[in-house]
Amino acid sequence: MLPDPRQEASAGGSGAFRRDPDVGRGRSIRLVVDDAVVEAFEGESLGVALAVSGRLLLRHSPNAQTPRGMFCLMGVCQECVVEVDGALAASCMVEARDGMVVSTDVLARARASTGGGG
């Protein structure tokens, strides 16, 4: 079960996902996710960067409005779709890049701005 979106994790992450300090990483980079800076490393997937930062809720299902996040981690399920630099993408299949701009739950925001329902 995904966490309640009203109880977002702090910038330090939820503790559910952590980077092993003994594993070598690429250089440190920064992304902008929903107007907040998120630190990541070159070579890791955007999905991992989001999870480690505590962002597990990535979208809501279009009909039932149930919370969705990473599931298969191989690009098949599309549960982790976010907007990356203006285009929709499965976050598990996108390599994190310095300066990328990411928006989560874009369908819900589009519905809210147009007054649309489920």
Image (tube, rainbow, N blue to C red):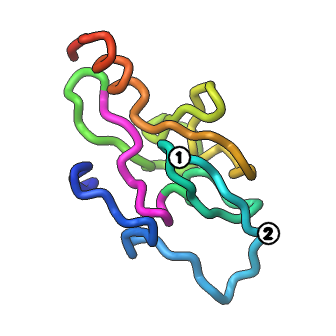
Tag 1 residue: 33
Q: In this view, does 49 lie to the left or right of 69?
A: right
By secondary structure, the bulk of the magenta-drawn segment is best described as: loop
Indicate whether 108 appears above or below 117: below
Q: Nearer the viewer, residue 110 or 24?
A: 110
Tag 2 residue: 27
Give amino acid for label 1.
Val
Residues 90 and 77: in front is 90
- Residue 22 placement, left or right of 2: right
Q: Is mark 1 on a helix, strand or loop?
A: strand
Up-down: is 100 above or below 83? Answer: below
Say what secondary structure mark 2 lies in. loop
Instruction: State the residue at coordinates (21%, 14%).
Output: 117
Question: Whole-percent x and y of residue 3?
Answer: 25, 56
The range drawn in magenta is 51-61
Write the residue at 50% across / 66% down.
52
Instruction: Indicate the amino acid at tag 2.
Output: Arg
